[in-house]
Amino acid sequence: MSRVTDPERVYSAEELAAAAPPDEPEPAPAPDETLTPEQRAENARRAEQDRRDRQLVRRLKQGDEAAFRELVHTYQNRIFGLMLRMIGNRQEAEDLAQEVFIIVYRAIGNYRGEGRFYTWLYRVATNTCKNRIKYLKGRNFHRSLDIDETPQAQMPAAETGAVITFQSQVPGPEAVTEGMRMEKIVQRELAALDPDHRLLIVLRDVQGMSYQDIIKITGLQEGTLKSRLHRARLALKERLEPFMR
């Protein structure tokens, strides 16, 4: 299997598919008696999602095209949301999300069922996104920030209610207008961050992923992840401070 390791090289979709990583076994869950009711409910939700994903992947490996369509339907909004916030251009994000699923289709044999399909899919997606960012950088691509024109209500599912929000508690049209203004500012300043920092904020604070899942996706150690996320949040906060006075 080839490896996508050159930070300067732009890889083809075929190379990205060939280099799609195998999944890794998940750690044993914490004893149920140590968990809060909310944690138990979340674990149950994850287990059900993983069960459905394994069934779909098994069918896909057997050549069932309907299973692939169902996987796309399940995850396309989240993958598109990731790409839109990372790339900033709606058309590029749509094309890139489509490319991710093409790579998944070609590389599904690399997924062995030992880890979560969800995190494996995001590893493929983030590798594909980083590759496209390198390509666009080489072409002096201008981020059009289409996301600035996308109302929060129209953002992909699983991103509504994001941590990064400045909605006022005071009702009325003025509060709504101010909230929309700040949302656009946040997205613009988020887009100005280093891509690695931007990725961590999107995964953790926008899409609400657990540290455990982000570790699986990025390959970072827990301490490194938390340190980088802290720096990313500080960088975003510094960029936002002039607008908060």
Image (spheres, helix red, strand yellow):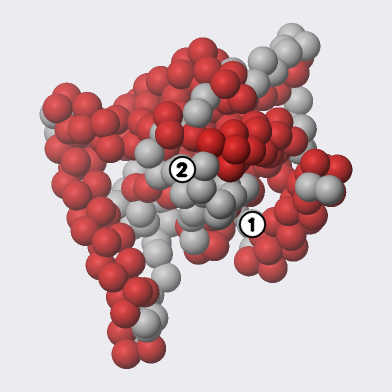
Looking at the image, is 198 positioned above or below residue 135? below
Residue 143 picture quarter:
top right
Q: Secondary structure at mark 2?
A: loop
- For label 1, the residue is 220
Determine the residue positioned at 51% across, 48% down. 171
Residue type of the residue flagged with mark 1: Leu
Marks 1 and 2: CB-CB under 8 Å?
A: no
**Residue 53 located left or right of residue 232:** left
**Residue 160 located left or right of residue 140:** left
- For label 2, the residue is 159
Determine the residue positioned at 48% across, 55% down. 209
Of callouts 1 and 2, which one flags the residue occurring earlier in the amino acid sequence?
2
In the orientation shown, which residue stands out farthest toward the top?
Answer: 139
Looking at the image, is 107 positioned above or below residue 143? below
Camera-nearest residue between 100 and 19: 100
Residue 42 visible (yes or no) = yes
**Residue 64 located left or right of residue 176:** left
Residue 47 picture quarter:
bottom left
Camera-nearest residue between 133 and 160: 160
